Amino acid sequence: MFPIPNQSLRSTLRAKRFRLVRPIIFALVAATSISACGGNSGDEGQPAPSGSSVATSSGTTEPSSDATKTTPLGAGELIVFERLVPGTEEPDLYTVGPDGGEPKLLRSPGNYPHWSPDGSVLAFYACLNPPECSTAVALLERSTGDAHGFPSPDPDLETHCAIWEPSGKRLACEGLSEGDPTRNGVYTVRASDGKGLTRIAKNRGGDDLPLAYSPDGSQLLLDRMDPSRREPANHALFVTPTSGGQPHRITPWGYTDDYANWSPDGRTIVFGTKGKLYRVSPEGQGLAEITLKTADGSSLAHAFDVAFSPDGSRIVFSVGSPEPGIYTARPDGSDVQRLTTSPTEDHHANWGAASDS
């Protein structure tokens, strides 16, 4: 059964994400989840995943008592994605090569993955200290497979940080405050310690989800929810200056995504909505559908969650039923290649650069 449109899922999943499990996804592949927690107490009563670290009450990280380590991932380009197995509540992180092959389990659970610009570290959402679940930053070292995290630097502000700035030094975060909704907006923190909280966008009573930086770091793409508008036309993609200033809308209301991406050359933003992929300029010009052509000449439908390869020569994206999986194509939609064929829900694919680590 083909899943419900992005915007219809968003309000329900937003509410769920900020509880213990904190699932998130509003793309077109039915129910998946993003656990966004972690943080400032020990992991009493539940062992940490293999090769992981847990955040302590002081905000530092300590390695798990489990000495088993995740197998190092190698130095080549690598695609990471979420896989939600039917009957489970939380997705796991898997990897697959750009040319396909058998996907390998990277971490369980984990979601909303984003590689650092140099491909050496993966930022993702996870609860590293259940049951408190206050992690703002969860990171996995590619060279070792070890995971560690940091709690939110402000206990009155819930922050979820996974979007790397081009320098690799900071992460952009969605910020929400139940006690003071005027604080809602986009913030950044240092990737090194999860501190240095800085606000770069305000959305009083609404919700801003950071999606991608421009290659020069001067602008940030975000999904903005306007609480004064009715669903499903209460979300759109915006671009905001990272130095502060007024965000500008680049898509019509209702055309949005939670996993849009910026091309390495800075000229194009790609996103998926209502089962189709689109491209648009950072100024909001030239909005056009990307028609996905398979080898037999037919068009591929039910696509979402799109991102660029490190060199911008290809895109990676998800497809819903009847042929679910992770696919790649050229940015114009030609030369479609299928990477995963499992009947599971595979989504939020992110293409990492070759790493020296």
Image (spheres, rainbow, N blue to C red):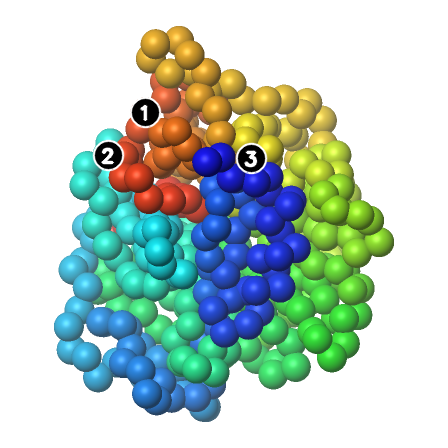
Between marks 2 and 3, how big is the CA–CA gap? 22 Å
Q: Which residue is mark 1?
A: 337
State yes or no: discs 3 and 1 in contact (Cβ < 8 Å).
Answer: no
Q: Secondary structure at mark 3?
A: strand
Q: Residue at 58% of width from left, 57% of height from top?
A: 13
Between marks 3 and 1, how big is the CA–CA gap? 18 Å
**Image side of residue 282 versus residue 118, left or right:** right
Mark earlier in primary sequence (2, 3): 2
State yes or no: discs 2 and 1 in contact (Cβ < 8 Å).
Answer: yes
Residue type marked 3: Gly
Q: Which residue is mark 2?
A: 100
Q: Quadrant of the C terminus?
A: bottom left
**Image side of residue 142 versus residue 159, left or right:** left
Spot the residue most to the right: 228
Residue 230 in the image: state x and y as whole percent.
Answer: 80, 48
Residue type marked 2: Gly
